[in-house]
Amino acid sequence: MFDTLSYSRRLTMTKIIESSYMTLFSPLITIFFVILLGVFCYKKQLVNKIQIDGFELLLFKIIVPSYLFTATYKNDLSALLNTGYIAAYLLTFGVLTIIVTALFIKSLSTISICIKILAASYVNSAIYALPVITILLKDPTAAIIGNIVQVIIIQPIFIIFLNILKHKEKSLIKKILSITTTPLIIMPIIGTSLNYLQITLPTPIVDAISQIGSGASGIALFAFGLTLGATKITAQCLKFDLLSVVFAKNLIHPFIAICIAYCLNLESYWFNSLIISASAPTAFVVYLISKQFSTEEELVKKAVALSSVVATISLVFITMVIV
């Protein structure tokens, strides 16, 4: 009787674990399918290089900013204020920034170092961290906080700094205008401000912006597939700079997150969320930023591809620990 009950419990637990893994990997399969569709379209020459450039410009200037506006405008800000997690998130980013700077400071320009810091630290929140945290931990709050921290704090600081470095010949007024008119910065700031001040926009306007940004994740994945199809990673590509960035992103970043989460004594949910976020691959938006400033484009493109592969593999180990 005891053996029968024990076997029944084991069988039930096995089915639960199998169900969890299927629930987790089903959206990942969808993600890979969209990426491969982009690769297929490029390989079959359904889209040319000029069209890809225009597609990425549309994504960078309109679609992603619309998505960020909607996310910041509609979310309950009071529920997203967890100072401990925000501090841990920023500290993790800061420590990794120091490490990457120390690694490249003697050999690269300041603007190249900034792009490498983003490539090693700026995580793919919308496409990786959000679904993984939601599925594994049953609560997307930490992923939403991480995304807001990146788009409201980290990204504007770096884009402002990159604008100053890249356009030294411009006057102060032109620099300010260049910064404030950058859609990736101004749209989430407007969304957050309206949310905080409880200013309600007309429903048709909000719905129109939401519709434009609603496909941001899928379109970004498809665009990534297009650029990935045009990217050739060979043994000659695996040089110190690329390997260092991928190593920093996929190994050093999670390790720092574990140390900081432990030192700050984060609760289990926030502890695991920080590790998942730090283990995420480099965000595709970093490639768009590098392209906007014409700096380290090829390296970032390859870093996004390689870090995505490594993150997918490491996800298996994360799942085994957290599930």
Image (cartoon, helix red, strand yellow):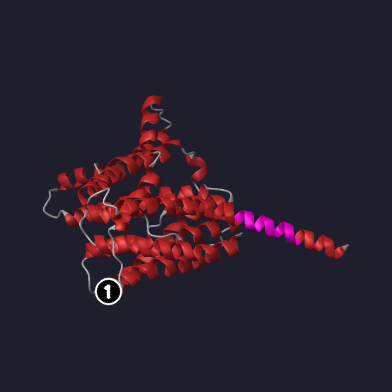
Q: Amino acid at mark 1?
A: Gln
Magenta-colored segment: predominant secondary structure: helix
Horizontal arrangement in the rendering, residue 44 relative to residue 133 (left or right)? left
Horizontal arrangement in the rendering, residue 149 relative to residue 233 (left or right)? right
At x 27% / y 45%, what residue is drawn? 55
Q: Is residue 231 above or below residue 103?
A: above
Residue 79 is at least partly visible in this image: yes
Which of the 4 quarters of the picture holds residue 118? bottom left
| Residue 196 spot, x, y in % from top left | 42, 36
At x 43% / y 54%, what residue is drawn? 32
Q: In front: 54, or 182?
A: 54
| Residue 313 spot, x, y in % from top left | 48, 65
The local crowd at label 1, few if under 14, some if 14 to 19, many if 20 or more residues have their Cα within 10 Å, is few
| Residue 171 spot, x, y in % from top left | 12, 48
Q: In front: 26, or 151?
A: 26
307 within the magenta span: no
Residue 285 is at least partly visible in this image: no
Question: Outermost residue, left direction?
Answer: 169
Magenta residues (range): 10-20
Q: Which residue is mark 1?
A: 236
18 within the magenta span: yes
Quarter in which the C terminus is drawn: bottom right
